[in-house]
Amino acid sequence: MSEVEFEPQSPRLFIPNFLSLNECRELEFIHKSSSTVGYRPIVFSTTLSHLIATNSSHFIIPFIPIRERLKDKLEEFFKCEYELFIEFTGLISWSRGASIGWHSDDNRPYLKQRHFSDVLMYTADDHNIHSVDEITEGERLTLALWFSRDGSHDEDMKLISLLSRHLLHDNMADSYLPLPASSNMYWFSKDQASNYQFGFNICWARLHVLGYDIYISQDSSCESDVSESLLKPVRLVRENELLDQEFVNIMHALQVFC
């Protein structure tokens, strides 16, 4: 690991190359195959609770060592060993046109439990201002974590509870197959006031970028919502060739080809 750098006059810790290239690629794959529409326009997110809810809890495994390594570094640097709890973990991406001005991550009454925050896979200039300039090209992906001294906000306890319910009530034989969330969580509309009349399914869009299109059976009702059709078994088309494999849903296709 590279030498830790920090500013003596500012309570910030900089760790260059904290994540390996392989770790970054793995997190990118998870996000592109599992993300939903985020909390701001043109922003997409993947949370650990969402991975559990969509039957993709195996994707949590790569996060675990990263979270623990980072928590150890924070506790050591800020001299608060064994005091911190992970409050939130999520992958957040910013697409072209997205931005956010300077802010703190505890700037709402319901966020006051956030005592420390971290952003990984992050690039900034020497000023290190906590903001996002407008994205002009591509997609800016970050792994965001928040830490609290308040154990009642421990994310792990909530995740264990979700996993327990999931394992007790779901069919373990199909546990490796994803179950998409509500279709509106994947529907991107730049104009949020349009009531979703204009937009696109982000899962379909990611497959399109990879060079694939979706084949929808002619047996499907023409009156049915296309987004709902994508929750059903689908096949892919590439360069006018219909691929043989059938996927249980579009999320399954993304996890294979993304």
Image: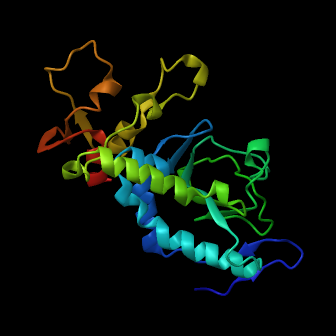
Q: Which residue ends up furthest to the right in the rendered image?
A: 9
Residue at horizontal 25%, vertical 38%? 249
Residue positioned most to the left: 244
Residue drawn at x 33%, y 43% as measured from the top left: 207
Q: Assign the N terminus to one quadrant of the image.
A: bottom right
Q: As rendered, which of 66 and 6 lies closer to the eye?
A: 66
Q: Which quarter of the figure has residue 227?
A: top left
- In the image, 37 versus 135, the foreground residue is 37
Residue at screen point 59% across, 24% down? 192
**Image x and y of residue 27, in percent:** 45, 62
Q: Specify whether 168 is left or right of 141.
A: left
Image quarter for residue 85?
bottom right
Color theme of the render: rainbow
- Quarter of image, res 200: top left
Where does residue 107 sit, x and y in percent of width and height? 79, 47
Label tally = 0
Q: Give whichever of 157, 1 is nearer the camera.
A: 157
Q: Residue 171 placed where, x, y %?
A: 23, 46
* Residue 230 to residue 236: above or below: above
Compared to residue 221, the image places residue 155 above or below, namely below
| Residue in front for this viewpoint, 183 or 60 | 60
Note whether residue 18 is visible: no
Q: Would residue 176 be visible to someone looking at this image?
A: yes
Q: Position of residue 51 (x, y in %)?
A: 42, 50
